[in-house]
Amino acid sequence: MKIFKKVLLVLLVLILFSAILGYFYFDRKFSPEKNYLQVTNESGKVSIKWTDEEKKAMLLPIHFDSDTTTYYLQFDTGSPYTIFYKKSISGNPHISINKNRAISSFKIGDSEVKSKQFKIIDFGEKANEKGFEIIGTIGTDILENRKTIINFKENYVIFNLSSEPQNFKNNAFDFSFKKRKIVIPAVLENIDEKFLYDSGTSGYELLTNKEIWEKLKLKNSKIREEKGKSWNNILTTYTTETNKNIEFHNTKIPLHEITYVEGYSKTQYYLMKFSGMSGMLGNKIFFEKQLYIDTEKMKMRIE
């Protein structure tokens, strides 16, 4: 009996030790690098451009000094970094490359964004869709310690707000910006949940796991299967109808569609599990709304 107790104690210690190691491993793995962006001036209203009628990708125009060309960055709140695409910036005189980093400065509206540490990724072919010269992604580093408005009703974004808008002072609620991920609390089917807001999944309302999808979908509703890419991963999405509501603080939004995804990388899967999130919110759920996001006070409002 004493031997059994000793073995059990050793096993418990090993399990606890493994759990602690696992926590620190994933905490470090999902922690982004230091924010190297320098952002000055309020941007004013920056018009949102969409790649297609279904609004599957949200593009923002940028300009370089002494260059009349309008370039575009995809606004992706699922990315903690502002990134340039290697093939798309090849030969661009406004972007200097030092090893695997880029040095540049550009204007987005009236805001100037500059860094000597822009990440570069070798992502696909040179991106040019329907006349849009897409050269990278603008990530959540532009939101950190700043105030932002994303207005889908009037189709614009304002970065680096100098003051809090009067009409947003009431009815704000807490959210999380840990590791530069926008995690929004919500109530779904009377259960408190947490959802990642990922504007890169623009054409979807709510992406969740198959269990929740099965529970919330309408009986006998048609299923739309689509293939897509998330960076270099091939994903398969299954979208169907639902008639549930999702509630953010005092704002209730009807859900029309719900989606589950197959093909995420293990890293993305463990990020969701490690963070305790139930799924992701795309732009589509907010198309009739505007969002105010304050990552200084960790306050948000959906109007």
Image (cartoon, rainbow, N blue to C red):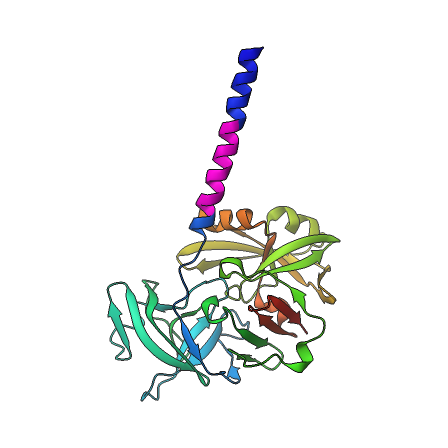
Residue 61: x %, y % from top left: 44, 80
Residue 65 vs residue 176, the one in the foreground: 176
Name the dominant secondary structure of the magenta segment.
helix
Does residue 220 appear in the picture of this structure? Answer: no
Where the C terminus falls, by quadrant? bottom right
Number of marks: 0
Locate residue 216 relative to residue 34 in the image: left or right: right
Q: Measured along the vertical axis of the image, is residue 8 above or below residue 278? A: above
User: Is residue 17 covered in magenta?
Assistant: yes
Question: Within the magenta stretch, is there residue 107?
Answer: no
**Left or right for 53, reference 115:** right
The image quarter containing residue 240 is bottom right
- Residue 119 against residue 165 in the figure, above or below: above
Above or below — where is 239 with respect to 71?
above
Q: Could you say where residue 185 lies in the image, as x and y percent from the top left?
A: 65, 59
Q: Nearer the viewer, residue 63 or 50?
A: 63
**Looking at the figure, which quarter contains the N terminus?**
top right
Question: Is residue 253 visible in the rendered structure shown here?
Answer: yes
Residue at the far top: name it.
Answer: 1
Q: Position of residue 124 (x, y in %)?
A: 34, 63
Q: Which residues are magenta?
A: 13-26
Q: Position of residue 266 (x, y in %)?
A: 45, 46
